[in-house]
Amino acid sequence: MRELVRRPAVWVGAALVVVAIGAAIGLIANHPTFVAQGSPSSSASRSLAAVAPSTTPETSPTRSANSTPTDTPTVSPTPTSSLSTETSKPTSAATAPPKTSQPTQAAGTAVLVGAGDIAKCGDLANRADAKTANLLASIAGTIFTAGDNAYSDGSTADFACFNQTWGRFKDRMLPAPGNHDYHIPGASAYLAYFMSRISSAYYAFGLGAWRVYSLDSENVTSSQVAWLKADLAAHPTACVMAYWHHPRFSSGKHGNDSDVQPFWDALYAARAELVINGHDHDYERFAPQTPSGTSAANGIREIIVGTGGAGLRPFAKIVANSDVRNAVTHGVIKLTLSPGSYRWQFIPADGSFTDAGSGTCH
């Protein structure tokens, strides 16, 4: 009698398993495909090389050779594979060329505002990053960062301090990493903090009539440069700009950085208008110039805005084509990006220094 009861139970159980498998297959077929980001490996180099992106953190000040406003951009970074390695340096957060797609935002005037070299833990009432954050509160638009977001090490604790000030606006922020963000291997705390906004250390987006690039200058690798060239070719927009951490030209403490020249070469070939950087803790605006530093009407205008909150530093050696300099005023730069033209305005958080002007797209 027990045998007669047991067998139907087995048949019913088998039927339930078949139904469950069918339901699972249906769910998979109707769910979008996600590609997991590979974990960073333990070796890399900041300089250009014919491998996947990689990096070196700065350990003293030395690094390796190498809100949802109405104008919210469509960001298109999705890494697709794990990272290859090349030398014995920590790996970049950028694991593979991000996927890009045609921006969906309608062309029109948009605002991009921000700075680099931002937050450091301390007395909130006296922190300069709290003052620059207060400026952001009164400026509508998309916020960028030009690296070194959270001092001193880009750790989870450091980003908790960033969150007290600039983090209030994370829902309209599109960052770039700096060397201090890489003190944590792979910039893992940086990526974790901004994971709701980005999934790669470099990416592109459409903002109004402009194509905008956020690049990883701690990893100027051939794969990132190849991606940049391909995206520029795929989006022959009349107006192009980019931002990243290390400046190609600078009169500040760190001076000129030739490691980022491949970025300049690609952008100049695409007739880009504007590059924004940080790293040197000052404000400096250059006349339009070529990647080799020759003044040219159709060159790229570089503006260094390392004034987000970190301690400011005096200029070292004044380099060619430097038009405006200030090393005593914290603040942000407001970029008004219109079809065919742009305006810039440095807005001080303390002091009276300001700088403003305009340019046209090539």
Image (spheres, grey):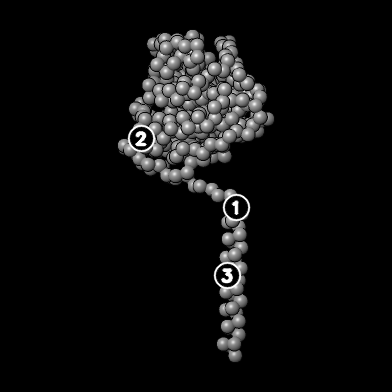
Which x, y percent locates residue 55? 38, 34
How far apart are the two marked residues, 3 and 1, measured between alpha carbons? 21 Å
**Which one is nearer the viewer's eye here, 249 or 196?**
249
SS state under label 1: loop
Q: Is residue 186 left or right of residue 136?
A: left
> Residue at horizontal 57%, vertical 74%?
14
Q: Quadrant of the N terminus?
A: bottom right
The residue beneath circle 1 is: 31
SS state under label 3: helix
> Residue at horizontal 57%, vertical 14%?
359
**Which one is nearer the viewer's eye here, 263 or 125?**
263
Query: What numbered label is drawn on residue 17?
Result: 3
Which x, y percent locates residue 232? 50, 29
Q: Is residue 137 left or right of residue 99?
A: right
The residue beneath circle 2 is: 50
> Residue at horizontal 53%, vertical 36%?
100
Callout 3 environment at 10 Å: few (<14), some (14 to 19), or many (20+)? few
Task: Decide which of tag 2 and tag 1 comes sooner along the chain.
Answer: 1
**Which one is nearer the viewer's eye here, 343 or 353?**
343
The amino acid type of the residue labelled 2 equals: Ala
The answer to whether any part of residue 152 appears in the image is no
The amino acid type of the residue labelled 1 equals: His
Query: What numbered label is drawn on residue 74?
Result: none
The amino acid type of the residue labelled 3 equals: Val
SS state under label 2: loop
